[in-house]
Amino acid sequence: MSSGDSTFDVVIVGGGPVGATLGALLRQTPSGRTPRVLLLERALPAERALSPERSRSPVDAASTPDLRVFALSRASERILRAIGGWEALAAEPASLAAYERMHVWPMRGRPRGEGALNFDAAELGEPNLGHIVTNSALQRAALAAFESAGGCVQQGSLQGVEFLADRVRLQSSAGVVTAALLVGADGGRSVVREQAGLGSESEDYGQLALVANVRSEQPHEHTAWQRFLGEGTLALLPLPSGESSIVWSLPRVRALELLALPAEDFSAELTAASDRVLGGLELVSERLQFPLRRTSALHYVRERCALVGDAAHSVHPLAGQGVNLGFLDAAALAETLAAGRAVGEDPGALRLLRRYERWRKSENESLALALSLLNRFLAFGDGELGRWAEQGMGWVGRSAALRRPFAERALGLSGELPQVARRA
Ligand SMILES: Cc1cc2nc3c(=O)[nH]c(=O)nc-3n(C[C@H](O)[C@H](O)[C@H](O)COP(=O)(O)OP(=O)(O)OC[C@H]3O[C@@H](n4cnc5c(N)ncnc54)[C@H](O)[C@@H]3O)c2cc1C
């Protein structure tokens, strides 16, 4: 199949990790005719530039390797294994590393002390708690899996959509294509969501997440560290290089003050915020900033259209769940469409797409709400409610039985999992 063909079963707009993974899953049809799938991406990895929203801090403009990293859950690992993308990631040891422990502690607590939440893979009978992977390696692996499954990738930006009775017609900078189903995997500012009239509601957290790489005095011990600060959260994610990636969420004004500091002063502030859990921290990269906002699509589907990943929901990054939820959306939608195909249903039929919406929407919304509450009461809680929240965290931390559901959530193994994400 070449991109010269203009009629497809499914057109996916957005070749980020979620869109590309969905494409690869769709091409792995267990029975019947393999669907023709086109992936439309405005900036393929080699050319991919940072959008203005993801702009580099004006202070440190030196070019650096990919600073965006994700904590991938076990469920995501299984989905990536199913498309053959995991092997490609594992072949890039500089981009993928397992982490074995996680320590989360409140402002008034100590990393492994009373009131902290401590998770250990060995205690849970798991080989690890998940993997840290760079965004670019993940996107490359998912795109390669899609292409080797015979999917078609086109570089272009979606410009317009026309919904017809039996198909959808897309206008992009690369030309015109038609499909039975359009999938929006085009991120938090989804054009598909807007063009399809699916609506959204959002909450501006008034915060920026600062992302950078740091060198630490003490080794990171293949451990993910997270501290609630009273004015945000700080996560230290272990990188294969021995350095750590920070995600430091703060009120916008405070974040901008920190971005304006020289590297040495920034490092000192960061070391203090980390409670010296890894000793002194030294900034070794530029600093990226991400405005934080929760967005939920009012509807995930309509006749001939469905949304997945950040196009359907953007959540607070404090638990590192965003792309993991997106992979579950992709697997759930692929499974729903495969079930429809097995009985000859039109992939764009609303009746079929509603099954996917019922499956994923309430689960994503409850997690988004839980993250907003954690942000309000633990990350920013300094009043009575904040103290109760810290106490609650302590109770959970002291009980192995209470900790278990949190660990399963972090591993992505709770809820109604798509087939490919279940234990083999
Ligand atoms: C600071 C920070 C830290 C995070 N850490 C984690 C973490 O540890 N773990 C985790 O699971 N999640 C994390 N997330 C969330 C994660 O970044 C997102 O959930 C994830 O990137 C969503 O993937 P996606 O494929 O849905 O969208 P995106 O990655 O946004 O991809 C969308 C794609 O669509 C393309 N596109 C957009 N518009 C068009 C158009 N009109 N035409 C054609 N193409 C288009 C874009 O170029 C892009 O490639 C974090 C987020 C932030 C801000």
Image: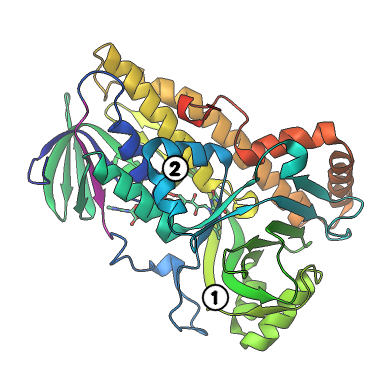
**148 is within the stretch colored magenta:** no
Instruction: Give the x, y percent position of residue 227.
Output: 76, 60
On the image, which quarter does residue 13 sit in? top left
Front residue of 379 and 97: 97
Quick check: 49 above or below 402? below
Left or right: residue 67 compared with residue 284: left
Give, as a single range, the part of the protein colored magenta.
34-43
User: Ligand 1 within 8 A of label 1's CB?
Assistant: no
Q: Residue furthest left?
A: 4
Task: Please report whichever mark, 2 or 1, sits nearer to the chain's N-terminal start.
Answer: 1
Look at 64% across and 61% down and name the residue there: 237
| Residue 287: assigned label | 1
Tag 2–tag 1 contact (CB < 8 Å): no
| Residue 69: assigned label | none
Which residue in the structure is indicated by mark 2?
309
Instruction: Give the x, y percent position of residue 308.
Output: 41, 39
**What colour scheme was applied to this rendering of the protein?**
rainbow
> Which secondary structure, mark 2?
helix
Front residue of 251 and 398: 398
Look at 92% across and 51% down and name the residue there: 114
Quick check: 41 above or below 48? above
Front residue of 198 and 220: 220
Quick check: 66 above or below 75? below
Amino acid carrying label 2: it is Gly
